[in-house]
Image (tube, grey):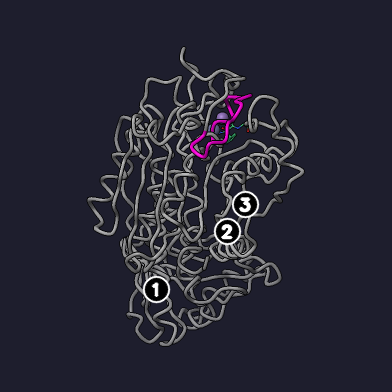
Amino acid sequence: MKCVAKTQAQLSARTDCAVIGVYDKAELTKDGKALDKTLKGRLSRIVASGDFAGSIGDTLLIPDVGTGPVARVLLVGLGTRASWNLRAYRRAALAAMQALLKCAARDACVYLSTESVEGVDAYYRARLLTQALAQASYRIPSLKSGRKPAPPALTQITLVAHTPAELGAVQTGIAHGEAIGTGSALTRDLANLPANVCTPTYLATTAKSMARTHRSIRTTVLAEPALKRLGMGSFLSVTRGTAEPARLIVMEYRGGKKGAAPTALVGKGVTFDTGGISLKDPGGMDEMKFDMTGAAAVFGTIKALAAIKAPINVVGIVPACENMPGSRATKPGDIVTSMSGLTIEVLNTDAEGRLILCDALTYSRRFKPTAVIDIATLTGACVVALGQHVSGMMSNDDTLAQNLLSAGRRSADPCWQLPLSEEYQEQLKSNFADMANVAGRDGGAITAGCFLWKFTQGLKWAHLDIAGSAYVTGANKGSTGRPVALLVDYLLSAKP
Ligand code: BES
Ligand code: MN
Ligand code: ZN
């Protein structure tokens, strides 16, 4: 699928499908009104008839608009003017792309790119449209037997730029949107694969193959003996109950100045979380194959940065293992020593994410990073607190937190800040070790963040809990590819 940018003047005479926005109460957009004139009032008659009211996310395909330069028109509901914002824009964009991919048009001219929306410019509008196209085109790597569905007819989409001055911004928006699209697709692929395919070894192989494809990426994989030498007793305590070998995957993306300090991304890579000896309930346990989405988001983000050739340095650090209740598994009450030297009493083996992340955070220090961001499906409590629409975010640095909040807002991949404070830390006290790995039910997302906080002294650090945003459940069960858009946006724009 190709995405191109054109100014109104450069538009070719013919298109298979013009995509036109309609506000609630049957109000055509400016571009819609112009096309309506060419089509001798056909569009205004349709909206006036009540057949298409313009509710947000609704679409109507008009397959035959006559013999003119436009073969079809796809009307897309934008909702009311009062509720028109970036979220509505994203919703309309996704609905438009889904409908386009279903129809027989081979090319399309999308006018939504000219519809202004508060808080973002032409670059973001083009980027969001391109991301929406990638999201709508995504197909789960199918392990179903039988015939594969036919590919869509659509091969090219033109995004319209208002003015020649806007053309460059739209082109960059398309390039970045495509990169974020392929990055998120990698994240979704890895997360959607079953845990008997997507093992720590599989993740390591993927990271190595990324380094072969992109000269800007260098991958190093550490196996268990090396982790033992590093003193990663906390990470290793999680993998004790499984026969599947653990890996620490390090991916260095070098697009910036040689020697310039990188940003570190640390992703939770639990390829399956049974809970260990503190075994989970069976209902929905299959979803714990998604417990490596933090790791997958690190992969997807680095892939996107390499495609963009972003002029920055980033290091991705992924501790990958399974959490299984084997005969050598860590038992509740066992005490382990982390790489930092702090000892941890493992009161609940199901709180394993923090145990692998704390050692990876300590490991990140060797890169002298300007900032460290960990990404993890860390707590069910975060899903209870925030649901699926925003990721939880905690940080020990206000500027970093603000930059992540803005990046999330701009990229329509939002996060929401939760507090960190000493009072919560107290809940992690242990009678037998420096700390316990759990702190009771209350404020579970925050106390998990507080646990990690203890390992980040002197670092500018933020934690993204994506337990709710990483995947959807129910009939459309699958990975969302979040928070790749947020991370790429942050890395392209923010310091620290
Ligand atoms: N991977 C889970 C968190 C999770 C739960 C992610 C639901 C997505 C959906 C994590 O390892 C876990 O089990 N956390 C425990 C922590 C508790 C024992 C303190 C939880 O949330 O129950
Ligand atoms: Mn767990
Ligand atoms: Zn987990």
Looking at the rendered structure, the kind of residue marked 2 is Asp
Find disc 1 in the rendering and name its residue. Answer: 172
Q: Is residue 88 visible?
A: no
Q: Is residue 211 above or below residue 327?
A: below
| Residue 81 percent location from the top left of the image | 67, 72
Distance of label 3 from label 2 (alpha carbons): 33 Å
Q: Is residue 240 above or below residue 454?
A: above
Q: Are marks 1 and 2 in contact (CB under 8 Å)?
A: no
Find disc 2 in the rendering and name its residue. Answer: 58
Range drawn in magenta = 338-353
Q: Assign the N terminus to one quadrant of the image.
A: bottom left
Looking at the rendered structure, the kind of residue marked 3 is Met
Left of 146 or right of it: where is 285? right
Q: Residues within 10 Å of mark 2 (few under 14, many from 20)?
A: some
Say which element carries label 1: helix
Distance of label 1 from label 2 (alpha carbons): 28 Å
Q: Residues within 10 Å of mark 3 (few under 14, many from 20)?
A: many
Q: Is residue 369 visible?
A: yes
Q: Is residue 343 in the magenta section?
A: yes
Say which element carries label 2: loop
Q: Nearer the viewer, mark 3 or mark 2?
A: 3
Distance of label 3 from label 1 (alpha carbons): 29 Å
Find disc 3 in the rendering and name its residue. Answer: 393
Q: Residue at x 44, y 44 (%)?
A: 363
